[in-house]
C-alpha cells in the first residue's frame, strides 16, 4: 500500500492540485488529505503524479524495423523492406521484439498499448511477463488470419489475464475484400462490439477506394455495417466533412499518429476540426519501423505543432486537449475505462513527472509544459496495475540487456 504525498496531482478533471493519492493493491482507494493508516509514503518531492499514457495504435514487434528502412516512400518501404522480413517472423520473434517495445513504453510513461499484429498468444505472454497492459486487435486481411481465428481470439484473450484484452478489427479496406469485411461486421453484431482498422491514412488509399467502390473508405465501411457499434480509425488523415459526420454519428475514435504520418509524408489529420466537432480522439505512435520512436511525448508535441502549421494559426489546438487525448482519450478508445484518470476506484496506472528537470522549469503551466517541453527523461516512475515497474532510470524486474540481446538476434535473422 502506497501513499503518494508532498507533490502535485493531475486530478480527474485535469487540474493540477496538491492532494495525497492512496494506492492499495491495483487500485486508487483515496484522493485527498485523508490520513489513512498502514500506507508506505512515497515522497513526490514537489513532482507531479499523473495518469499514464496509453498508446492507442502500435505494432509492437515491429521494433525489428527501427531505422532499417528509413527515408523511403511508403510503398517501397512497406513492400520491399518490411513485408519480406515479416514473412520470416515466428512466434518467438513476436515475444522478443515486443519485450523491447515494452521497455520503451514503460520508461516513457506508457502503461498500455493497442497492438495490431500476429501471434497474439506470444504478445499476450510477453505482456503478462513484463507486467504491461495490452489491448490486442487482429490484423485480419485477405492473406492472414480468418473470421474463425478472430472469434477464437476475441473469446480467449478477453478471458486470459487482467492485463490483456481483445478488440475486433481488420488491417484495412485495401487489404481486405468485401466478403471478409461483411463477415467481420456480422461478428461485431453478434458481440455488439466496436471494430478498429487502419483508415484513410494516405490520399492514394482514399482515391483507390473511391475508384473501386465509388466512395471513401469511411463511407464504404459504414455502409457495410463495420461501425454499427462504434470503433476506431487508425490515422484518420484524409477524411472529409461527410466522413467526420459518420465519425460523430457512430462514435468512431480517430487515433492520431502524427510522427509516423509526417515521416512517411502521409499527411496531417484535421485534429483541430475534430476537436471542434466533438469527435473522439486518441493518440498512438504506430510501429517503430515507421516512426521510429514509441514516444508519446514526441507524439503530443508533433500533433500540436502540425495542427498550428496546418491551420496557419498559432492558437490552434490547445495543448491540454492533446494531453487528455494521450491519457484519458486513448484509455477510453482502448476500452480501459478504469485506467483513464486519477480517481477513487480507478486502476493504479500512474507516472511521476520530474519537475526538477531543466526542461520543466520554471513552473508556469505544468500541463502545457509536459506537451511542449516534456520528454522521456522527465519520467521518474512508472506504476502499472499498482506495481512500480520503473523508477529513476531502472527497471524493477526486467533484464534489459537480455531483452536487447534477444531482439538483436531476432532482427539479424530476419534481415538475413
Image (cartoon, rainbow, N blue to C red):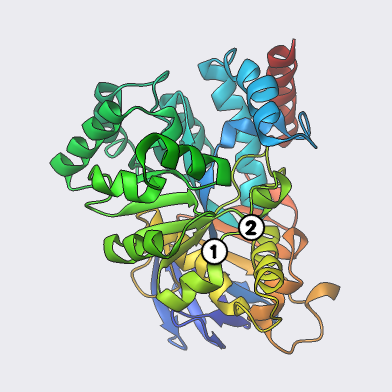
Please state which of residues 68 and 335 is positioned toward the viewer in this rendering: 68
Question: Callout 1 environment at 10 Å: few (<14), some (14 to 19), or many (20+)?
Answer: many
Q: Is residue 326 left or right of residue 195?
A: right
Please state which of residues 264 and 128 is positioned toward the viewer in this rendering: 264
Q: Quarter-wise, where is residue 145 in the image?
A: top left
**Pointer 2: what residue?**
296
Q: Are marks 2 and 1 in contact (CB under 8 Å)?
A: yes
Please state which of residues 264 and 156 is positioned toward the viewer in this rendering: 264
Q: Is residue 289 above or below residue 253?
A: above
For the image shown, how many numbered marks are present on the structure?
Answer: 2
Q: Position of residue 391 (x, y in %)?
A: 68, 57
Q: Position of residue 183 (x, y in %)?
A: 22, 30
**In percent of the image, x 28 and y 60: which residue is there?**
250
Q: Residue furthest left?
A: 190
Does dot 2 land on a helix, a strand or a loop?
helix
Q: Is residue 368 above or below residue 296?
A: below
Q: Position of residue 21 (x, y in %)?
A: 49, 76
Q: Is residue 98 left or right of residue 414?
A: left
Mark before the other along the chain sequence, 2 or 1: 2
Q: Is residue 70 left or right of residue 144?
A: right
Residue 51, label in figure = none
Please state which of residues 124 and 70 is positioned toward the viewer in this rendering: 70
**Pointer 1: what residue?**
326
Question: Callout 2 environment at 10 Å: few (<14), some (14 to 19), or many (20+)?
Answer: many
Amino acid at each position: 500500500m502506497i501513499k503518494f504525498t508532498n507533490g502535485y496531482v493531475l486530478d480527474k478533471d485535469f487540474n493540477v492540485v496538491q492532494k495525497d493519492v492512496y494506492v492499495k493493491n491495483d487500485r486508487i482507494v483515496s484522493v485527498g488529505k485523508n490520513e489513512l493508516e498502514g500506507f508506505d509514503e512515497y515522497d513526490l518531492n514537489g513532482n507531479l503524479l499523473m495518469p499514464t499514457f496509453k498508446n492507442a495504435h502500435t505494432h509492437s514487434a515491429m521494433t525489428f524495423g527501427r531505422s532499417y528502412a528509413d527515408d523511403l516512400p511508403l510503398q517501397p518501404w512497406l513492400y520491399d523492406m518490411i513485408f519480406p522480413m515479416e514473412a520470416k517472423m515466428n512466434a518467438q520473434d513476436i515475444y522478443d521484439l515486443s519485450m523491447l517495445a515494452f521497455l520503451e513504453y514503460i520508461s516513457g510513461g506508457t502503461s498500455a498499448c493497442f497492438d495490431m499484429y500476429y501471434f497474439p498468444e506470444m504478445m499476450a505472454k510477453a505482456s503478462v511477463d513484463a507486467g504491461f497492459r495490452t489491448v490486442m486487435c487482429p490484423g485480419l486481411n485477405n492473406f492472414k488470419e480468418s473470421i474463425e481465428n478472430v472469434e477464437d481470439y476475441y473469446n480467449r484473450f478477453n478471458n486470459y489475464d487482467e492485463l490483456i484484452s481483445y478488440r475486433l478489427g481488420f488491417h484495412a479496406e485495401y487489404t481486405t475484400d468485401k466478403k471478409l469485411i461483411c463477415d467481420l461486421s456480422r461478428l461485431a453484431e453478434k458481440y455488439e462490439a466496436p471494430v478498429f482498422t487502419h483508415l484513410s491514412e494516405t490520399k492514394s488509399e482514399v482515391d483507390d477506394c473511391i475508384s473501386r467502390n465509388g466512395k471513401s473508405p469511411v463511407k464504404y465501411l459504414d455502409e457495410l455495417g463495420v461501425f454499427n457499434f462504434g470503433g476506431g480509425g487508425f490515422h484518420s488523415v484524409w477524411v472529409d466533412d461527410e466522413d467526420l459526420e459518420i465519425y460523430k454519428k457512430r462514435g468512431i475514435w480517430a487515433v492520431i499518429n502524427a510522427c509516423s504520418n509526417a515521416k512517411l509524408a502521409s499527411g496531417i489529420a484535421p485534429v483541430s476540426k475534430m476537436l471542434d466537432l466533438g469527435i473522439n480522439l486518441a493518440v498512438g505512435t504506430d510501429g517503430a519501423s515507421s516512426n521510429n520512436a514509441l514516444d508519446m511525448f514526441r507524439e503530443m508535441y508533433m500533433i500540436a505543432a502540425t495542427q498550428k502549421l496546418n491551420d496557419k494559426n498559432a492558437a490552434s489546438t490547445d495543448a491540454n486537449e492533446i494531453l487528455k487525448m494521450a491519457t484519458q482519450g486513448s484509455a477510453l478508445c482502448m476500452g480501459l475505462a478504469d485506467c483513464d484518470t486519477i480517481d477513487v476506484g480507478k486502476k493504479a496506472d500512474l507516472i511521476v513527472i520530474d519537475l526538477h528537470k531543466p526542461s520543466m522549469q520554471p513552473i508556469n503551466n505544468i500541463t502545457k509544459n509536459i506537451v511542449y517541453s516534456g520528454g522521456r527523461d522527465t519520467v521518474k516512475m512508472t506504476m502499472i496495475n499498482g506495481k512500480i515497474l520503473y523508477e529513476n532510470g531502472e527497471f524493477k524486474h526486467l533484464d534489459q540487456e537480455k531483452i536487447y540481446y534477444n531482439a538483436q538476434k531476432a532482427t539479424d535473422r530476419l534481415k538475413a
